[in-house]
Image: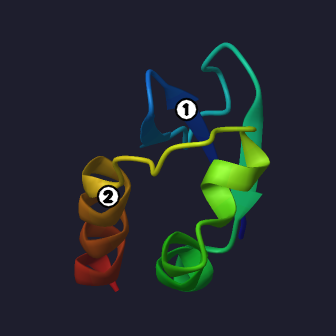
Amino acid sequence: MLLRVVCREGTIFPDPNHRAPGRGAWVHPQCATEAIERRAFSRAFGLTTQTENRELIEYIESLNLKK
């Protein structure tokens, strides 16, 4: 399962329904932490600044609680 994420105003949001407008990036939920550490989302969205990832991290943690 891949998770689509979108960036709005420098904040990365999960898009589990694949409906959010704009450019999206795809990541495996278990690899998201590594992607954040490597600043992969900044590169994917063409940003020169670091992204805010709190909402994405909280969403992924909630997925782990359901298992």
Q: Residues within 10 Å of mark 1 (few under 14, many from 20)?
A: many
- The picture quadrant where one finds residue 59 is bottom left
Above or below: residue 28 compared with residue 8: below
Quadrant placement of the C terminus:
bottom left
Question: Disc 1 marks which residue?
Answer: 7
In this view of the protein, which residue sits in the foreground, 52 or 28?
A: 52
Q: CA distance from mark 2 to mark 1?
A: 15 Å
Above or below: residue 37 compared with residue 54: below
Question: Disc 2 marks which residue?
Answer: 59
In this view of the protein, which residue sits in the foreground, 18 or 56?
A: 56
The nearer-to-camera label among 2 and 1 is 1
Instruction: Give, as a three-letter code, the residue at label 1.
Output: Cys
| Residue at image point 60% right, 78% down | 38
Above or below: residue 55 compared with residue 11: below
| Residue at image point 37% right, 68% down | 60
Quadrant placement of the N terminus:
bottom right
Above or below: residue 55 compared with residue 29: above
Q: Position of residue 40 (x, y in %)?
A: 68, 65
Q: Position of residue 28 (x, y in %)?
A: 67, 74
Left or right placement of residue 62 versus residue 1 in this view: left
- The picture quadrant where one finds residue 5 is top right
Instruction: Give, as a three-letter code, the residue at label 2.
Output: Tyr
In this view of the protein, which residue sits in the foreground, 52 or 58?
A: 52
